Amino acid sequence: MKDLRIKISGTSGQGIISAGDILSYATARKGYYVTTYRAFPSEIRGDGKCYYTLRISEEKTLTATGDSDILICLDEDTIYEGLDTIKDDGILIYDKDIVPELKKTNKNIITYGISLKSLGNERARNMVALGIVVGLLKNLHLEEQILKDIELRYKAKAQEVIDSNKNALNSGFKYALEKLKRKDNYECVKMESTGAKLIMSGNEAIGFAALCAGCRLFAGYPITPATEIMEWLAKELPKLGGKMIQCEDEIAAINYALGSSFAGVKSMTATSGPGLSLMQEAIGLASMAELPIVIADVQRSGPSTGMPTKTEQSDLFAALYGTHGDCPKIVLAPMNVEDCFYQTINAFNFAEQYQVPVIILSDASLGPRRECVDLIDLKKLKIIDRTKPKLKKGDIYNRYEDTQTGISPITSVGDKYGEHTITGLEHTISNAPTPSPEVHKQMTEKRFRKLETATTKFSKAKTYGSDDASIGIISWGSTSGAVFEAIDKAKKKNIKVQALYPRTLYPLPTTWIKDFIKNKEVIIVIEANYNAQFKSTIVERCTHINRGTEVLEFLKYDGTPFFPEEILEEIEKVDKIQKEKNEISTNKHTHF
């Protein structure tokens, strides 16, 4: 077995997330590839359920979602919730102090009911269970690294806390090796270490890329699930002479960042849906004043407060069409953790080069998710800074010069001979406010001309699967891992499918979609929202070139991410219908 999924579940306060983080970090440091998925309730303490899935492999994996090989349950409810997700011959580890007798199940699984409290203590049951798993997978040799990671995790706490957790882990580990009557063959699991790599979350990747791109000012307000970006940059920005400012709300945050950008500092903010709503007026100001700024929107289930810790892709309308007036902007959608890094680099480059607001659309599935990323050669990164004019004494500086590309050289506060003011009013090339219809038409065209120039620099849409497939999938963002894995599973069943993933959603070069659908009989648009926002705003516009292409939608809006198995089921259903249609068409033609 070279690919293993482990799921840990329980209630808030039982250390589910801590155990998962420790195991995932230790596994990555041993040189294996790791992909994770974390889900937790909005309540800090209470009856809310926590789930942590990590997938360990010799090779890069696409998603952690899906059926598990080992399920650890620290409460009764999650046992029966999770039974259907355990693979045949998989393992269920549960606390028999809480569930003395397991209900009968038709699942062909191996069960280990263990008194976790007796092996440690009430607060360290998570570490006991982790030690048992490490013992079951003894050939991965994780125990020493996990002990080191326990020290790193709890280094700010008292030594007795560290010792208690280490003792609990050792107790579970020894029990698995010496006392557990094993009914499984997981001691045969062995993987090859593939060397050094990075492990980071999507939020951390955005923060890291911001630093690399030259961001030196982050202004924000805490909001789940984007807060991790702010917390990470709060630690790292000061090391490079930058600052993190926690503002009183999202309106203040984006305006603080805009003021910093006016002063010549690369700036960003991060938020989720409710905060993006509050930022809309300032996004309009950034467009009118042509100020570079990057906004990361880590989407969550909405509207209103919604479900803060659950995922959705329902801010697309707000990102594409939010704010007022004709507002040029760029919207990017990274596909995975590694892509979060590179699309954030692109975001800063686009913002600086084209002097527009750039929105990065992540979500609660991708932001907290941790993945292994191959080491990044920072020397190879292309970093673009804003174009500055070459001015000398006596020159007249027209801040909004109407150029062929629409890009006007910009000065910063303190630059010699480049003094200027900015305003949210429509203005002439010298920034004199004006209500002139002719000037408004001229300047609107100038601002949008920048986007026409920008489209030549966008990353090409990612395709995955068979070029000659008659079934196509078009989607965006964090759904990519589940979709790509489903395509691989479909291939094993002799069903050819190809997916298209644009990383730039606005302005979207429609040729990407038009070219993709030319040889497709049916397109499935997959997205995590109720209104099929991507399908209705973009995809349906492009299907007129091939009227024989049927466009379907497969939507999910329950707050959970897509699973490969459910996408495969949809693919099989569509394939069956298409084959039946083709057979009927062939029979009609034959009779004719």
Image (spheres, rainbow, N blue to C red):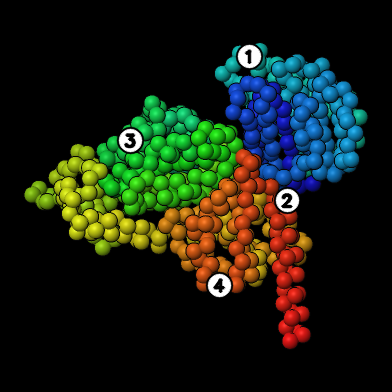
For marks 1 and 3, the one nearer the N-term is 1
Residue highlighted by disc 1: 159
Position in image of residue 242 (x %, y %):
37, 32
Residue 518 relative to residue 435: left or right:
right
Question: Under tag 2, what secondary structure?
Answer: helix
Dot placed on the residue nearer the N-terminal end, 4 or 1 = 1
- Checking the image for residue 565, the label placed there is 2
The mark nearer the N terminus, 1 or 2, is 1
Q: Which mark is residue 255?
A: 3
- Which residue in the protein does label 4 denote? 546
Q: What numbered label is drawn on residue 513? A: none
Q: Nearer the viewer, residue 365 or 569?
A: 569
Q: Secondary structure at mark 3?
A: helix
Label 2, label 3: how many angstroms apart (C-alpha)?
Answer: 44 Å
Distance between the alpha carbons at the discs numbered 4 and 1 = 67 Å
Which sits earlier in the primary sequence, circle 4 or circle 3? 3
